[in-house]
Each structure stands twice: as C-alpha cells, then as structure tokens.
Amino acid sequence: MSKTIFASTITTVLVLGFVGAYGQAPDQPKGVLGILHAGQSVSVRETNGGFEVSTFENGVGILGQTVVDVGPDYLVVQDVIATTETRIPIYSIKAVISRKFVR
C-alpha cells in the first residue's frame, strides 16, 4: 500500500514538473542573436564569410534595417522604407556587433 502511494506521488511530481517546464519559453533567444530584438534598428552588411549585423546601444536610430523577428536559428530584417524583408539563417551570420555611441 505505501509503495503504491509513494509511486503515485513520484509520478504526479514528475508529470507536474514536465508540464510546468514545457510551458516556459525563453523571451529572447540565447547565443549570437541574444542581443537583438524586434523593432531594433540594425545595419546588415554582406561580407565574404557571411553577414555582419551591427547595432548601436544608445545612439543612431536609423541604420538601414529594422529587426522584424528573431528566432533560434534565423533573423528577419526589413529595410527602412519597408519594401524588402530579408530572412537570414543563423549559419549565414558571421558576427553580431554591438557598438556604443559616444557623446
């Protein structure tokens, strides 16, 4: 009898733990794209090794593109006049550069 109660208690705790952990999604992706967020002004430059994405922490507001979406393995940017939307896979991004605007 006590083994049955113990087993059912352990099963309940495990199920509740999995359900609780499943519902929690990170707000912002980790890794190289972790500093980017939707609505952020960025500059995207194509180089030999891939794309370089640059942003200013506290300065210039119009850099050429705006971040539309940041996923775990992609970045979506839109040009300033909102005519072109570009989806960049993570393997094509060479660097994400964060610069500080000195006043």
Image (cartoon, rainbow, N blue to C red):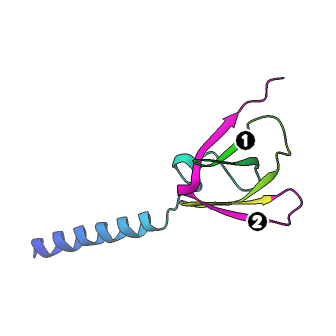
Q: Is residue 55 left or right of residue 92?
A: right
Residue at 70% x, 42% y is: 54
Distance from label 2 to label 1 (Cα)? 18 Å
Q: Give the secondary structure at mark 1.
A: strand
| 85 part of magenta stretch | yes
Residue at 76% x, 50% y is: 40
Residue at 75% x, 46% y is: 43
Number of residues whose C-alpha sits closer than 10 Å to that of mark 2, classed few (under 14), some (14–19) or many (20 or more): some
Q: Quadrant of residue 101?
A: top right
For the residues bearing labels 2 and 1, Cβ distance under 8 angstroms: no
Which x, y percent locates residue 30?
A: 52, 50
Residue at 53% x, 56% y is: 91
- The residue to which callout 2 is attached is 85
Q: Quadrant of residue 14?
A: bottom left
Q: In the image, is residue 35 above or below residue 21?
A: above
Q: Residue furthest top?
A: 103
Quadrant placement of the C terminus: top right
* Extent of the magenta region: 79-103
Number of residues whose C-alpha sits closer than 10 Å to that of mark 1, classed few (under 14), some (14–19) or many (20 or more): many
- The residue to which callout 1 is attached is 55
Q: Is residue 11 left or right of residue 85?
A: left
Q: Amino acid at mark 1?
A: Thr
Quadrant placement of the N terminus: bottom left
Please state which of residues 87 and 35 is positioned toward the viewer in this rendering: 87
| 11 part of magenta stretch | no
Q: How many marks?
A: 2
Q: Amino acid at mark 2?
A: Glu
